[in-house]
Amino acid sequence: MKSRVHLLMAGDPERGGLASRCFDACLMALIVANVIAVILESVEGIFLHYRELFYTFELFSVTVFSIEYILRLWTCTETPDYHGAVLGRVRYAFTPMALVDLVAILPFFLPILIPMDLRFVRAARLLRLFRLLKLGRYSYAFKMLSGAFQRSKETLAVAASVLVVLLIFASSLMYYLEHEAQPEAFSSIPQAMWWTIVTLTTVGYGDVYPVTPAGKLLGSFIAVMGIGMFAIPAGVLATAFIEEIQKKGSKTTREEETTVSPQEETIALLERLDALHDKGVLSDDEFLAQKERILKR
Amino acid sequence: MKSRVHLLMAGDPERGGLASRCFDACLMALIVANVIAVILESVEGIFLHYRELFYTFELFSVTVFSIEYILRLWTCTETPDYHGAVLGRVRYAFTPMALVDLVAILPFFLPILIPMDLRFVRAARLLRLFRLLKLGRYSYAFKMLSGAFQRSKETLAVAASVLVVLLIFASSLMYYLEHEAQPEAFSSIPQAMWWTIVTLTTVGYGDVYPVTPAGKLLGSFIAVMGIGMFAIPAGVLATAFIEEIQKKGSKTTREEETTVSPQEETIALLERLDALHDKGVLSDDEFLAQKERILKR
Amino acid sequence: MKSRVHLLMAGDPERGGLASRCFDACLMALIVANVIAVILESVEGIFLHYRELFYTFELFSVTVFSIEYILRLWTCTETPDYHGAVLGRVRYAFTPMALVDLVAILPFFLPILIPMDLRFVRAARLLRLFRLLKLGRYSYAFKMLSGAFQRSKETLAVAASVLVVLLIFASSLMYYLEHEAQPEAFSSIPQAMWWTIVTLTTVGYGDVYPVTPAGKLLGSFIAVMGIGMFAIPAGVLATAFIEEIQKKGSKTTREEETTVSPQEETIALLERLDALHDKGVLSDDEFLAQKERILKR
Amino acid sequence: MKSRVHLLMAGDPERGGLASRCFDACLMALIVANVIAVILESVEGIFLHYRELFYTFELFSVTVFSIEYILRLWTCTETPDYHGAVLGRVRYAFTPMALVDLVAILPFFLPILIPMDLRFVRAARLLRLFRLLKLGRYSYAFKMLSGAFQRSKETLAVAASVLVVLLIFASSLMYYLEHEAQPEAFSSIPQAMWWTIVTLTTVGYGDVYPVTPAGKLLGSFIAVMGIGMFAIPAGVLATAFIEEIQKKGSKTTREEETTVSPQEETIALLERLDALHDKGVLSDDEFLAQKERILKR
């Protein structure tokens, strides 16, 4: 029984069969519906009108997700990785996907278990969005994105340190130049950092900008030279992500490209040479001469 | 008669001759004039002043385009692809270019056939702009662009799914952080999505931006990391488009690049020579002479 | 005498010697000083204060540039390209650099020759800025930039046609969606084009932006997909420019890379083989065998 | 004693041992704490509340940095580069890192030594930020960034000259077109340059933008064509920086790639063998055996 449930939930379409695929599709639909519900709830008009419906749907979702979580915890011992009735389950409970599953149901149970003020309840509602991460189990794009992060980790770290230094210098200089003219917008260096980020990402909302000639001059210089630095993390991530996507497609292509090993080539050429000799195309002497040439390579 | 009309309209300058090229040029000019007319009509001052002229031009254009559509439908059976008096024509009528031709004249006839309210009539006027797509028949850039779409379809789909997830997360977080401080601008998650898109495309109109310290901090982080993700579709499309343009020139170069090892070439030539000898194409003497030449290389 | 003046002005430092280099430096300094003068004149406070000085400097500059122009026209016949006292000079007068020289002095003489209204006089003042182009004779960056234009001409043309179509479609759709809500900002399609350009270049001043939900939705889609298209001309030009700069440095590197022709290689190998034979390292038989192998390649 | 102190401060973890590493970590922590202090001081609320603490910390930091500077100046003669009790120390005092160390303590001592007005004292406070540059001694990212600057120096210089010309032209044209409509925002050409920079970096705050049709048309054209030019310095720097980071990993790969034709290798080996034989390293028999092995390959 346990092993059949495990197979059903393992998300392996080849071994799980139709039932497994159907189970996956239903769960995915429920996750998407949940995310849509969270988004729609935030629209006041819709929320007030369909309050009951939203609550019922939430109750239903939490029930399903709770059962799913319990079943996964129960059946995880089927996998060799999480062997052991207690220790295996504890280890499984701390895998990223199991934590995501837990976070998906926690916002519902937490306010019941512990009395909380209203502010926390609202934040808990937001946590329901993390149910979207449950899709990670099925999603190709998620894997690509985390692969892209892994690959560009090092470059991102170096770029981040440069960004922090650039951010501190640019913001401090602008603070000293603009503080007097705009005591509100450039009230402190952390405030000035908002200007630096809005400028160097080229977003430029227009809520803060230099007004003094010196501030404009420095701001211009910072913008022309610094924009590239702030574009590095975004650019590196995007490039790695695109490469990650295109890697799969070219894997098979690459295998074909990898030049055949010389030993294999030698054998293949000898086989073809032998065929020509057998058919009498080449005399014995010619055959031997050619054979030698191939063997000597 | 039908085949001559077909040749005239086929847009094949080599076989169609001067008359065909002249026909194409006139039609292209009329299409461009139509687009300019739609643009100018939208300027109130010009529209009120030249009302009559615009109406006359529209009448003329629709007449020409209708005749063109009917002629194309009549002569399409000349092409082997659309053989059959009824079935061939129906199949032709559902090709993209034929649909574009239909949409180009429909906005004029529809309000006559079916009584409609004014709102729809205005939208119908907009449809006249799709006459621009008629240029697709003649345009090189259109082909490049649709080629670029085809090539980057897969990457675009994966990027789109990441974009949607990123959009939902960023918007929801900003909504929860800024909702209280700015109940108008961040009234709901869908509203907050406008901020996310305006920020992550780096457009930054300045109509919505975070004002709370927490919102600014999160907004900064989202901007620095997320801009690259939103730049992917635009960047992938633009790159594919440029590649599509430059592909033509490098096609021949690539073919020359593929090289084979001399030993393999020798064997392959001998195999082909042997095949020719077996079929009696080459006499024994000719075969031996050629074999020697190949072996001596 | 004429040939000596020509040598002085030809800008050929090797043949012209110190005098020529000095002449070039003085002229370049005068051009830069002129551009700075035009910029400073535009600042009202400075202009009113130093009016006389600016006028004197302008008089001096025009005198020098006029003499330079006349001398160049006089001595151009020294070059084989512009032979012929009248025809050669006329041909020279229509070369780009000669036209630039003429435009540099025209703004001063034109208002004297023909009576003009004040508006034109102001525009004429602007023409003085084109004196900057006189630097083109000496400038490396100018050559690089025009080279970049030449190289990417084709791609730019195709991209421009796509841009125009995209601009028309995006602007028309936004006009129809936003016209009623914002009759001022989206008063006509040409007006809506300003929104499209400000958005798709990601500048986003914030003077016009969609306010209706439908407009925001379409605007988001246009921005996410279209930004790449509007980035093409700028990106193509910038890439070609950088390549143009880096081309020079790698020219010599490339020449070394070009694989030696097989004939040359054969000769070189035979020469080295012969040297080994002469020294007795290889016996006659060995030498012949190796020679054969090299010749048979 | 001096040499032990020098070893402690040299920042060479292999020779300096645990004490040296501990010393480096403490100094780095102090530098970071200083930068955080400067940032926090700029927040008025925090500054007024912890005034005493900030002053005490500054006193402590300056004491430590002063001792560090004196010790470095004292021990620098241990390095062969700065030999000589007086001349060596003077030469060391003018190295970039020594100057940074001096600037880090100067803002404290200068106001004591020379009486200054308040304005200068505030600027001196800003100089404390340059203590961040002291991290350069330990930082990998600093080296990468300065390497990136070195590599792209030439391209940056050419791009800068094009930028200046483009800036002058665009600003002057916009000034002449918009001056009458917006006498405030486009009051002079230098003022219009702010618009050009804000537009061509695509920041687009929205504080200045063209309002006349002619200004919008020109502004659109400048934006579409010019954005790429202003993106060059930022892009070139960012690319060089990323390459600098990734260079390390690929160094070994390149060396393996260079390949030589087998015939050439044979000859080259024979030449070297012959040389060894001539020098008597190889006996005749050994030489012949090796020769055969090379020839048989």
Image (cartoon, coloured by chain):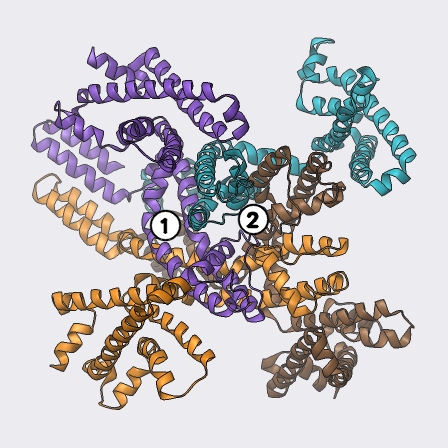
Chain colours: A orange, B purple, C cyan, D brown
Which residue corresponds to mark 2?
A: C204
Instruction: Give me the residue at 43% from left, 51% from top.
Output: C213
Which residue corresponds to mark 1?
A: D262
Frontmost residue, A205 versus B160: A205
Q: Secondary structure at mark 1?
A: helix
Check the residue under mark 2 and report the chain it is in: C
Residue D92 lies left or right of residue B198; in this view the side is right
Instruction: Give me the residue at 90% from left, 75% from top.
Output: D113
Q: Residues within 10 Å of mark 2 (few under 14, many from 20)?
A: many
Extreme bottom residue here?
A86
Viewport quadrant of the N terminus of chain D: bottom right
Frontmost residue, A12 versus C248: A12
Q: CA separation, marks 1 and 2?
A: 62 Å
Q: Residues within 10 Å of mark 1 (few under 14, many from 20)?
A: few
Viewport quadrant of the C terminus of chain D: bottom left
Q: Position of residue C154 (x, y in %)?
A: 48, 31
Check the residue under mark 1 and report the chain it is in: D
Where residue B68 sits, quadrant-wise, is top left
Q: Secondary structure at mark 2?
A: loop
Where residue A116 sits, quadrant-wise, is bottom left
Instruction: Give, as a three-letter code, the residue at label 2.
Output: Gly
Q: Position of residue B292 (x, y in %)?
A: 20, 34
- Do callouts 1 and 2 mark residues in contact (Cβ within 8 Å)? no
Instruction: Give, as a three-letter code, the residue at label 1.
Output: Pro
Q: Are marks 1 and 2 on the same chain?
A: no
Instruction: Give me the residue at 77% from left, 17% from top.
Output: C75
Frontmost residue, A257 versus C267: A257
